[in-house]
Amino acid sequence: MTPKPENCQTMSDVRAGVDRLDRELVRLLVIRQGYMDAAARIKSDRSAVHDDARIEEVVSRVLVSAQEQGLSPDIAEPVWRKLIERCIAHEFDVWDAIRAKKKAG
């Protein structure tokens, strides 16, 4: 069993905890990606994929949650901005692929 951070005694403990959390983060990001796939399927207009107001709304909510839970905003904000950037790129790719498939089929 992986110890909590405050109970880590060795770097092996720390690394095991980080590795376990990385696996969990990947699992959660797969779910988030699924929502991006759904958005690409649902949005009828490609210009709706990138929404500046929604980006700022998401980042603001994340920063509030980060503060409540003790995550440094210096970690939270750039991580989420990059996550959003990459998710938007993925959504564009999926949006295009769905429409290309419909056109071809």
Image (cartoon, rainbow, N blue to C red):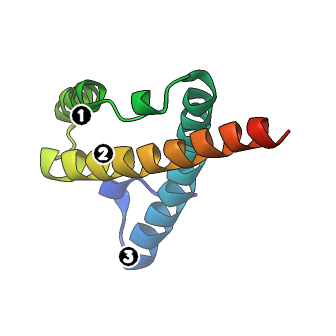
Residue 46 in the image: state x and y as whole percent: 48, 33
Of mark 3 and mark 2, the one earlier in the sequence is: 3
Residue 61 in the image: state x and y as whole percent: 25, 25
Of mark 2 and mark 1, the one earlier in the sequence is: 1
Give the residue type at disc 3.
Answer: Thr
Q: Is residue 5 visible?
A: yes
Mark 1 lies on residue:
59
Mark 3 lies on residue:
10
Q: Nearer the viewer, mark 3 or mark 1?
A: 1
Residue 104 in the image: state x and y as whole percent: 81, 43
Which residue is at 31% across, 53% downward? 82
Which residue is at 39% across, 68% downward? 14
Question: Label 3: few (<14), some or many (≥20) within 10 Å?
Answer: few
Give the residue type at disc 2.
Answer: Trp
Quadrant showing the N terminus = bottom right
> Callout 2: helix, strand or loop?
helix
Of mark 3 and mark 1, the one earlier in the sequence is: 3
**51 lies left or right of 44:** left
Question: Label 2: few (<14), some or many (≥20) within 10 Å?
Answer: some
Looking at the image, residue 11 lies above or below residue 22: below
| Marks 2 and 1 in Cβ contact (< 8 Å) | yes
Mark 2 lies on residue:
80
